[in-house]
Image (cartoon, grey):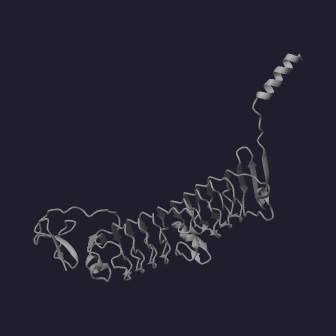
Amino acid sequence: MTRKTSLILLICWLISPPIVCSQHLTGTCGKNLQWSYDSIAKHLDITGSGEMDLYKYPAWTNKQLTICSLSLSDSLTSIDDYAFEEQALTSVIVPASVKYFGKHAFAHNNQLTHFEYKGDSAQANDASLYNCRSLRYFRGHMRMWAYCDAIDTVIISNGYACESYTLPTYIDNTHAYTTRLTGKYSTQPKAVQTLFLPKDLETINAFALCYAVDLGGITIPEHVKTIGNGAFLHCTSLDSLVCLGQALSTIGDSAFAHCTGLSYIRMATIVPPTLAPNTFQGVDKSIPVYVPSGAGEVYRMTPYWSDFFYIIEDSPATSLPKVISSFQQQSTDNGCYDILGRPVNQSTTHSIHIRQGKKTIVVAY
């Protein structure tokens, strides 16, 4: 080989990009679980079945690996304490097979924006997603996160059980983690805007969702029997309250106090739920309250419901009108109509009617 050829080869070698070989690290993370790590993609893949056991099989936790993406086996049944703490995950989907989430399992993943648990039943330790500051979308157990300031969509799955905190029969604010709905104790609070409650929920306990100042509307599932004291206290952006089903019997003191954004209430219960004196304190009493056909007079005669001026009989909670319909001119034998333009037999207490086809409001007291 001539000197010139050698020189050319040397120059080509110097200017050529380095060839990086992907390194796959493998190991065991449970009795029947295996893990594989791609060092180029920074992807961790867990295969096999059963419980994770990082105490017996330290796996990746002592190798200082950076994990940007994660695949979990559909047969994985548990995720250990601190398993994926301080990683670079951006999105996590956990299969329904997982029945246990360990303490700080996904804590301090500051790039994590999407977390979704596919199952309906699991035990979750305190703050499995602690301090995930970029998290926006969450589906899982309310107890799973704390100090996740950016959350704006929460879907609470059915059937969770965790010590005294049980869904779908109980929502409790005994522990500070539930205030993550408001960011009340966060350094950079951003409240939840969308909340989907499980369809089998039976009780919303005292102060469960208080001060969720960005919550835009709430639909109470049909099996809810009780809404506790202060449950939605100071939810100032709440613009609608829709209660489905016939189960609701009690709405506690200050449950919706100072929900100044409420524009309408829709009830499906024929028997009015029992209210306390301050249940709707600070709420505009001129907003319409839609009740089932034939229940209007009962609501008007029931303490504290009678404070609302416009109790309007309508079909059960299937449509969600935001405004009162404009007056309509019709004719009947007595010429008396309700505010929606429907004929009524006679004026009733605390209601507004139109008489003789004229756009004249008659208030009967």
Residue 179 position, x and y percent, is 54, 70
Quadrant into which the C terminus falls: bottom left
Query: Left or right of 123: which side holds 322?
Result: left
Query: Which residue lies at the image location 19% right of the left edge and 65% below the top edge?
Result: 341
* Residue 353 position by quadrant: bottom left
* Residue 180 position by quadrant: bottom right
Residue 228 position, x and y percent, is 46, 78
How many dots with numbers?
Answer: 0
Residue 292 position, x and y percent, is 30, 72
Query: Left or right of 114: which side holds 260?
Result: left
Residue 237 position, x and y percent, is 41, 65
Above or below, 40 relative to 67: above
Query: Left or right of 8: which side holds 111?
Result: left
Quadrant into which the N terminus falls: top right
Query: Which residue lies at the image location 76% right of the left edge and 41% below the top edge?
Result: 22
* Residue 239 position by quadrant: bottom left
Question: Which residue is more in the foreground, 96 or 272?
Answer: 272
Query: Left or right of 284: which side holds 138?
Result: right
Question: Which residue is more in the foreground, 160 or 84?
Answer: 84
